Amino acid sequence: MATEQTTTGLRERAQADIFIPFVVTRIALVVIAVAAMAWVPSIEGKQFTHISPNPLIDLWHRWDAGFYTKIALYGYGWQAGLRDGDATFMPLYPLLIGLPLKLLSNPTRVEAAIIGVLLSNACLLGSLFYFDALLTLDGATIRRRRLAIWLLLVAPTTIFFSGVYTESLFFLLSLMSIYYARQRRWVIAGLAAFLAAATRVVGWALICLLLWEAWQQRERFSLRSLVRGAAALAPLAPLPMYVGLVGLMLGAPKAFFEITRAVWAQGVGVPWRAFTEFFNGPIDFFGWDRSLVDLLFLLVFVLLAIAAFRSRINYGLYGLAILAFPVWSGTLMSIPRYGAVGFPYYDVLAKWVEGHRWRTWALLVSSALIAAYFTARFVTWHWVA
């Protein structure tokens, strides 16, 4: 009887704390997006394409989504010996979209986009359960866990978690990696971390989470310690494997880096180069190269990462590491998306507002309003991140 009551209680809490916020925010996101497409002037041109006259389908297919659906449908350019910009996109997400497409006789971008949206939202929903479970391990109160979930779902970049983008898949896999590491299930943790790094270049940052956790669980040398060490280092493997494959296919070992530099103006350099480049020209509020929004988000994320050290050292390290890639690559472009997957940030904010009613509502409402603005820009082909 007690077990049945506990199961019922967990089911009711999951419905209240996870399903309801998920459904409410996703419906609100669609309503805002469709309204924006109807009333806000969209950028028009050959490159600003619409894959469907149905706004419920078309709204998700913007910017990088076109690369993912193209890869899922036709493969990478480097597979045909071309140095296309799609080479810089890690393979797991488009691969998962492409698998069900093989069951269709003549798949199009519409089918690819629909599968991508379903995949992203399924991963987002799954990540909420793991986020709640991880916060429970951290001793968070029910109120704090609820706040963290709401803050994630109304974050300014929430449109990317539901669109044809890698954010949700990466978020789910990164949470799984640290959750199972905390549970000492290192084989699953290492596999999740490997797959996360095969989803986004920044996945290498997961070693900050896993190495620290492995050190905390250290013991006498054994097979178990070897497995733990290998799992903690697993996020380092996918990028060099993929870089090597691209180089082999194109007959140039450095092809990946050359394409990244030529197409996306990113390359390994000194960390201050991103800032010298940023201030070496006109700065727009929203801009491809120099955006005030990118700089503001970077400052906020750094402060949140520093605050995360108070929870766990590896949370703070991870919060800083996911920002390191864009900074070291020489540009602050898309910083809001890089930081969007930093789960420690949402917990820090939840702790900050917990127990403060007006602070809570101010943060939730302001974040939701920014999210609505970003969504309206995104669906009308205005640059966000």
Image: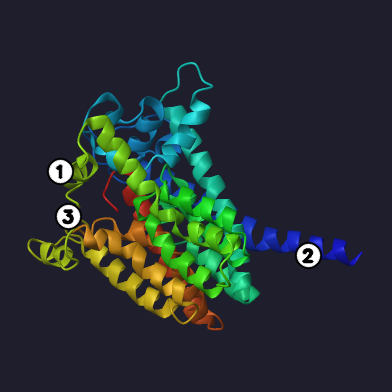
Q: Residue 6, image x and y in percent?
A: 81, 65
Q: Viewer-nearest of labels 1 and 2?
A: 1
Amino acid type, mark 2: Gly
From this view, report whether residue 221 is shown above or below residue 262: below
Q: Which residue is mark 3?
A: 289
Gap in angstroms between the C-alphas marked 1 and 2? 55 Å
From this view, report whether residue 92 is shown above or below residue 207: above
Q: Are marks 3 and 2 in contact (CB under 8 Å)?
A: no
Q: Which residue is mark 1?
A: 262
Q: Secondary structure at mark 1?
A: helix
Gap in angstroms between the C-alphas marked 3 and 1? 14 Å
Residue 379: name its quadrant. Answer: top left
Furthest residue toward top? 105
Q: Residues within 10 Å of mark 3 (few under 14, many from 20)?
A: some
Amino acid type, mark 1: Ala
Q: Nearer the viewer, residue 241 or 364?
A: 241
Task: Point out the image quarter for the N terminus.
Answer: bottom right
Q: Secondary structure at mark 3?
A: loop
Q: Residue 288, image x and y in percent?
A: 20, 52
Q: Which residue is mark 2?
A: 9
Say which label, 1 or 2, has the lower sequence index.
2
From this view, report whether residue 218 is shown above or below residue 50: below
Q: Secondary structure at mark 2?
A: helix
Say which label, 3 or 1, has the lower sequence index.
1
